[in-house]
Image (cartoon, grey):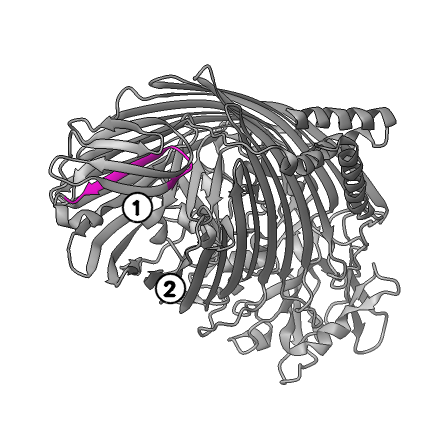
Amino acid sequence: MLHLKIIVLTFATMLQKRIFHRSFLWILFLAEMFILLPLASWAQGQHCNLLLQGKVVDTHNGEALAFANVIAAPQQIGTITDESGHFVLSQICPGPLEMVISHLGCETLRLKFDIQSDTTLQIELEHHVELLESITVVSKRVEGSATQTKSTLEGAKLDALMGKSLGESLKSIAGLNTLKTGPTISKPIIHGLHSSRILLLNNGIRQEGQEWGSDHAPEIDPFVANRITVIKGAAAVQYGLGAMSGVVLIEPAALPKNNTMGGQIHLIGRSNGNMGIAAGELEGGWKKWKNFGWRLQASLRRSGDLKAPAYSLTNTAMSERSFSLAAGSQTGALEWKTYYSYFQTTLGILRSAHIGNLTDLEAALQSERPLFIEDFSYEIQNPKQLVRHHLAKLEASRNWENIGKLQLIYGFQFNHRQEFDLRRGGRDDIPAIDLDLTTHSIALSFAHLPWRKHLSGKMGISGLYQQNRNVPGTGVRPLIPWYNSPTLGIYWIEKWIANKWQVEAGLRYDYKTIQAKRFDEQQNLQTINLDFNGFTFNLGAFYQPGDRWMLSTNLGTTFRPPNISELFSDGLHHAVAAIEEGSTDLQIEKAWKWINSLKFQQDPWQVEIDAYFHLINDYIFLQPDATPRLTIRGAFPVFSYQQTDAWLWGVDFTGQLEVYKDLLLRIKGNWVRAKDVEKDQPLIYIPADRVEGSLLYAIHTNSHLKDIQFSCGLEHTSRQNRTPEGVDYAPSPQGFILVNAAISGNVLLGKQTLGIHLKLENLLNTAYRDYLDRLRYYADSPGRNFEFSIQYKF
Amino acid sequence: MFDLKLFLRVSLFLITGVSFLVFSGCKKDDPVQENEEELITTLSLVLTPDGGGTPAAFVFRDLDGDGGNTPIITADKLAANTTYTGEISLLNEAANPSEDIAAEVKAESLEHQFFFATTTGLNISFAYNDQDDNGNPLGLSIKLLTGDTSTGALRVTLRHEPDKDASGVANGDLTNAGGETDIEVDFTVEIE
């Protein structure tokens, strides 16, 4: 405990000498931790409260294997599978785990992997002694905080989505939709809400791009992820402001801990847009430094104009490049990690969506085809966006035996966004928007081990400092002002774990200030200071009566300060020919989200149902004003940010049925309803009802061609009939059905495998427009696409 | 044994250094006023009777650009059954000295065209009086012919990147022009 005394001493000395201003004390405290951590004595200590469960089945007939011995080494915790092949092991320590599985008539089997969170395994056991090596882990599901409703994409599921943008990938989870600005720009919607109302955590750092804009896609390359987890509840207590409707966690694989080099290569070709994608990953260790691991990862993609069934979508070409470096090591109780990633994208925006005024918009709405159709090209012309995003991270943590784990994370992000417009006088190469956004974030947390075997918890403090600067020389009045904004948050969560129960409660306080500077109408520099603060709490329970049922409920409150665009925007939104006016009088949004989840698992069924109710007081939205504004380009409708009370509720459903041996039927659907309570009318841009059904057939072989799988599916999106009156320019588009199909398999090449995927999307080349596409006024969505991809792991 | 004094000295030194680096970065960096180069504050159409006489002027002026104060629109009366030569000038009067935007339009004549439309009942006809580099109409200069006494609205439109080869566009019909609207101004015209 020596180091703790030192902190107190140094702290006290500084206070007496009044060297520093009080507001910097917490920064200093964190800096202290950085210096003290490496000096602290090393000890082994782990947080052994993980749950490992699963099922053991026979590969040949899929039958459950009862009375199999399952032992987790090195802790030597063991159990026997029940008559349905299930087993549950609790109090597993995180880290490398060796499992020993034995069954009558089989030799003892060993399975090694790294366990970091609650895990569910499906183990297929080859019932012949000579083929013992073919034991495989088919699926591995992470549970994490059990009271929160979560969905995870990883392994084969994530591999099948490789090459898609983050927004498109997440659409494969029930309850998630995609908000689009044409085919190149997409961002996730969780339970009807998006942008500032959800939070993206990239490698433990909250993504700070210009997420307030509905046409600003997240600056994340999904190739960095080994696992994408979506929390569908209000998880603001742990993750902070913005986690109102949900959180998306993008996590890379754990770094290797031994000196073997490995990696993988992905090559993907898509017919629509003649897109090519190449991605690679290389990882290894270092002979002289035990427990040190590193990883290099890079990806490139290039696409030309996409094609709708009837015409080319001129200027929807894009190019993207990104790379990341990671390194880390664990020495005894001390662990450190460092990470850097760079992401750059150039996105063309549908040429026909560039309009000058309402007359142009009306002309576009009346025309069935876009007004600009040119031949296919890879060229990205104006209007376009050029975005660069840097992220650097330093993480250090230390374990204390029987006490817990202290973790410190520092993140730095620099986002540079340039938007190029069609301009007069040879100004096409001068960006009309040129923003530099810099964010520093620092988070210190302490997770304590179960006290009296049942109560475990986490407390933390996090700080964020963000500044926006407009790069001068655009020749356009900036949309977003100069601002500096620090945020400070402090939280505490405790969890009571009993045999079948878990109960969780958390509390958080956040304080945020914004200092903005802009020029008023008389061209005088104006400084505006705003501050927001509030409490957030969370209460959840999880109940697992047996291994078939799982129930969870979570009630969370959150608040959200108005974002920078809601406060300060004042100007024309080109794509929709409307003037949007912010207001500095806006108050914080206060929300309550209650989500319940039920999981049922019994062969041949697997069902998950999530139901939620979300109440948002002072919900910020765009309200059309009665009088249009006259400008030299004609009269424009004016929309101003106003507040109301809103309700959102809905249900997500995921079901799987093994219809026949190796033939699976999967059904997925989501329904959202949203209402402006004050005006008693629906909210705009709420996802329409969507149902997806697919059939999967797997073929098991013992040849070099393995894991062959066929699938075909239907995706039905209804027409959104619940829209507010007098706000939208065009009625919501008709509902549509898309047909998709895929074949995948693995080829054994010596010890390595080559994964092959062939995908057919929108097989019938259906012409449709998506209600959640902001450019649906101008053109249809892309048509049929064939995709071929190979993945080589070594 | 752990040397507390040395440790304190080192950590204080480091903290001071880090703080210095962090806070020295906070130099005064107020925002810079953007010069709105593409702003058009003023459109004026000056109509001079071909037979001589006092010119009539139609002016749209919005000195503070979009928002703020409402634009000031003035229109002189026109004489019946008269042929006028009209010249359009476009200015950014928010800049000092004011910028001549018409010159920019003229320099990019292939990408621009003016259109003139009237509401029914207003007895006016138009003809283009200038050409772009390909011999298609531009419309900075026009001929305007008034008929009998009437009132109505005149709409002046400037299109950026219109399809000048589309049907009717060379005769001043907007229907098939496409492109984006840079200017769309309505004047109330009285012919007496």
State the residue lying farthest toward the front. Answer: B1
Dot 2 or dot 1, earlier in sequence: 2
Instruction: State whether the magenta stretch is mostly helix, strand or loop.
Output: strand
Of marks 2 and 1, the one in the foreground: 2
Mark 1: few/some/many CA within 10 Å (<14, 14-19, 20+):
some
At x 45%, y 67%, the residue is: A305
Please name the residue that numbered disc 1 is placed on. Answer: A716
In the figure, is residue A428 to the left or right of A312?
A: right
Q: Nearer the viewer, residue A38 or A233?
A: A38
Residue A402, position as x, y percentages in the image: 50, 23
Residue B68 location (% of width, % of height) = 77, 46
Q: Name the foreground residue: A155 vs B161.
A: A155
Query: Where's residue B97, x and y in %?
Result: 88, 65
The vertical placement of A209 against B174, above or below, is: above
Residue that numbered label 2 is attached to:
A268
Foreground of the two, A323 or B83: A323
Q: Look at label 2 and name its amino acid.
A: Ile
- Residue in view at x 28 percent, y 54 percent: A740
Q: Residue at x 60, y 51 (%)?
A: A391
In the rendered structure, which segment of residues is drawn in magenta?
A114-126
Say whether residue A746 is visible: yes
